[in-house]
Image (spheres, helix red, strand yellow):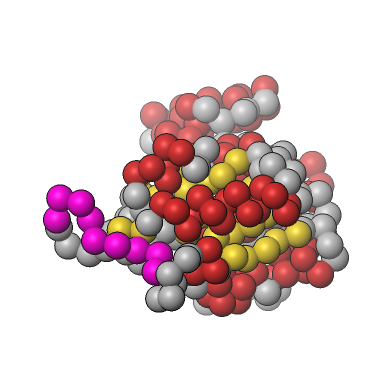
Amino acid sequence: MKLDIVTIFPRMVEAGLAEGVIGRGIERRILDIQVHDLRDYTTDRHRSVDDVPYGGGPGMVMKPEPLARAVEDIRTRRGEPGAVVLLSPQGRKFTQTEAVRMSAMSHLVLLCGRYEGMDERVRTAVATDELSIGDYVLSGGELPALVVVDAVCRLVPGVVGDVRSVEQDSFSRGLLDYPHYTRPSEFAGQKVPDVLLSGHHEEVRRWRKMTALRRTLERRPELLNTAALDDEERRMLDEIRKEQETGQ
């Protein structure tokens, strides 16, 4: 999978790509990620990427020309991307569903904004998608870009060593994950649930399903509206709801 990230702070992004599963994916050549300094696509001696906003107001606005040149250069040298994604608080919310969709693409371009934002014509004439990682304000698009890269690339076959780890992640099927435990069997006065020490694989499987459903219902009940539940999980969810209704 190829990814190209356009930013005015390339070292900030490169540092985030160097570690963990993404770093190993790059080392193993499963991932081909290039970071581009937007200032390399400017034409003035000051390497300006921003200018004052039309109509007045505080702050500066990122100019459209350098971003357009960067994307065109990427197309020429790296091929046509499946999507050119603008990271913006005004975009639709980035979800696991979006991560799965994007992981099927062979090439993505991510544009990192700064200052008061980008010229609107970047969104309409350069980008094909606009995504937000949440309803809060950050200083720029570099951290959101790294979030998108991590969420998407860990779904690429071979990036995460154990595929079962990816399949069982929170949100992979619309549910939160079940609780995890390791040694010691008792910590801070709390013991590991007996079922996990029993060696009974079928009971462990059922316990994990049940606790994932219970946790989702308690913490993020709206996820159950679209979760891909199997017949057993639907029966379990009915049991949990009946327990709540009766106060048991």
Name the residue furthest left: 56
Q: Residue at x 17, y 62 (%)?
A: 58
Q: Which of these two is toward me, 112 or 232?
A: 112
Q: Residue at x 40, y 76 (%)?
A: 46
Q: Which of these two is toward me, 152 or 77?
A: 77
Query: Is residue 82 rendered to the left or right of residue 95?
Result: right
Image coordinates of residue 57 in percent, x first then y, are 15, 58
- Give the overall secondary structure of the magenta segment: loop
- Residue stretch in magenta: 48-56
Residue 113 on the magenta span: no
Query: Is residue 210 rendered to the left or right of residue 45?
Result: right
Residue 53 on the magenta span: yes
Q: Is 236 situated above or below 77?
A: above
Image coordinates of residue 97 in percent, x first then y, are 58, 37
Q: Residue at x 70, y 49 (%)?
A: 76
Query: Is residue 178 rendered to the left or right of residue 113?
Result: right
